[in-house]
Image: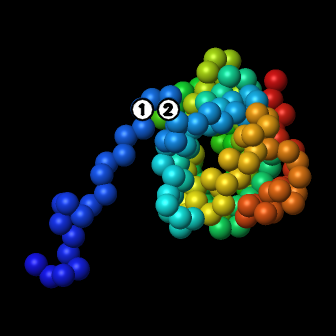
Amino acid sequence: MNESAQTWADLPPALRVAAGEDRFGEHRGLGISTITFKVAPPDSSGTLILENTFRHKGGPARHLHHDQDEWFYAVEGEFIFEVGQEKIRLAAGDALLAPRRVPHVWAYVGDARGRILIAFMPAGKMEVFFRQVTKGNAMPPPDPELWRAHGMELLGPPLSVQ
């Protein structure tokens, strides 16, 4: 066995985050929804995965990420997306990738609870962004400087949903 080979004892332990729980045991509200961190990387080069649970219709403002691909997996409920010029509807079990530098916007449009998993690859400043904006228990404000400080561009309003 060479010196650089890992043994089972050297590997990090498995990480289990229970249903409805946050990786750090914290509560994060966005007004119409809550988010829980499921996977948070030790640095900005890893993948951040969060679960967004909706009680009401709506979603974030139109934006783009300079350095992150954003992957979505609908767990429960129905969501609409605009990625670039494409309009896409996701139902439970559907997934979608919004590539970096492509404008996108999305919203929960169901009548009951909605849940979606979101992965940011790499995480960049997204964990810091969500920690900051959830302090006010409201959707992220339309402040271009706030979004830019976290590697995004704010491009327009949220989708209009009835």
- Residue under numbered circle 1: 18
What's the residue at 85%, 45% (across, down)? Answer: 141
- Residue under numbered circle 2: 21
What's the residue at 80%, 44% (across, down)? Answer: 140
Do we see residue 101 in this rendering? no
Do we see residue 37 in this rendering? yes
Colour scheme shown: rainbow
Amino acid tagged 1: Ala
**Mark 1 and mark 2 residues within 8 Å of each other at the beta carbon:** yes
Answer few, some or many: residues within 10 Å of disc 2's Cα (few below 14, many 20 plus, some between 14 and 19).
some
Dot 1 falls on a residue whose secondary structure is: loop
Amino acid tagged 2: Glu
| Residue 118 appears left or right of 126 | left
Q: Which of these two is toward me, 82 or 14?
A: 14
Alpha carbon separation for disc pair 1 and 2: 5 Å
* Quadrant (top left/top right/bottom left/bottom right) for the C terminus: top right
**Picture coordinates of residue 89 (x, y %)?**
64, 37
What's the residue at 73%, 35% (across, down)? Answer: 30
Where is 19 relative to 124, above or below? above
- The mark total stands at 2
| Residue 141 appears left or right of 68 | right
Q: Which of these two is toward me, 103 or 153?
A: 153
Residue 7 picture quarter? bottom left
* Quadrant (top left/top right/bottom left/bottom right) for the N terminus: bottom left
**Picture coordinates of residue 67 (x, y %)?**
65, 67
Dot 2 falls on a residue whose secondary structure is: loop
